[in-house]
Image (cartoon, rainbow, N blue to C red):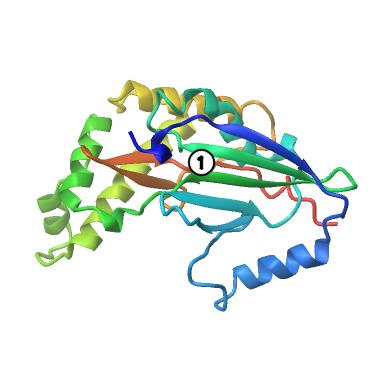
Amino acid sequence: MKLYELIEPTVTKKNISARFDAERSKEKKDKMTSSWRPKSFSTGSYAYGSTTKDPHIFTKKSYYPSDLDYDAYYKYIETAMAFMKSNPYFPRVYNVKLITDKNGRIKTSYNIETLKGPEEFSPESILAMGKRMIKELKAEIEDIKNRYGRIEFDDIYLSKWIFDEIVNEIYGAVRMRDFDNIKDKKLIDAIQLIRDVIDSGNHFADDISTNNVMLRGTSQGPQLVLADPIWDFGRSQIKS
């Protein structure tokens, strides 16, 4: 077993004597979400990140301080930590860093596994993964081609299409708490945990999409990972 495969999540707390500056946080977000951002960085509405010196580890940092009671990603990771060893549908998180400024405001930073998109796997391997998870999956490769009257589909297009069908099935299961078409018990467990976090207050919503569901490469093929499945409407961000 490699070092990066050891899943022992830790939480590190750090206090700083300075205060977080809202204007600098906004400048950072504007830069990271512009076309001029460094190519090595990934960006989102609430956080940005990049791989570390170890390519298996990705660091995700928030732009603004966060109210952790309203922070959907923090609540998801905090709740899932106990199950990361036993349930492969949760992301592997190695460290959560909470940095508190002189005014008591907290910024978060996460060291997590580096995940991949469907374009990095063959359509056959993604379809095989889907059939292990979903009882009835409407994503047969030939059916997709025939459905649209096209014979020539490149593998990247097919991989993304099949992945989208899988994610849509999971979205429906999360939204409706309907597990009739879910085959894998561990996926059901993961969906139930997501629903429990969402239902813990009135400030979270499901956010299952191909932007927030990713893949882990394994010796048995791709493994679906529910990377960031909950949204807090931006209410957790402290911008002043």
Quadrant of the rendered structure where residue 117 is? bottom left
From this viewpoint, is residue 180 visible?
A: yes
Residue plotted at (15% across, 48% down): 124
115 sits left or right of 61 in the view: left
Say which of 160 and 78 sits in front.
Answer: 78
Say which of 127 and 135 sits in front.
Answer: 127
Label 1, residues with CA under 10 Å away: few <14, some 14-19, many ≥20: many
Residue plotted at (47% across, 24% down): 83
Quadrant of the rendered structure where residue 132 is? top left
Q: Position of residue 222 (x, y in %)?
A: 27, 43
From this viewpoint, is residue 139 visible?
A: no
Residue plotted at (86% across, 57% down): 240
Residue most extreme to the right: 103
Three-letter amino acid code at the position of disc 1 = Pro
Q: Could you tell me how many numbered marks the image carries?
A: 1
Q: Position of residue 150 (x, y in %)?
A: 13, 65
155 sits left or right of 111 in the view: left
Residue plotted at (28% across, 56% down): 120
Q: Position of residue 21 (x, y in %)?
A: 83, 61
35 sits left or right of 98 in the view: left
Q: What SS does tag 1 mark? A: loop
158 sits left or right of 54 in the view: left
Q: Position of residue 34 (x, y in %)?
A: 59, 74
Residue most extreme to the bottom: 36
Figure check: 119 above or below 38: above
Q: Quadrant of the N terminus?
A: top left
The residue indicated by pointer 1 is 229
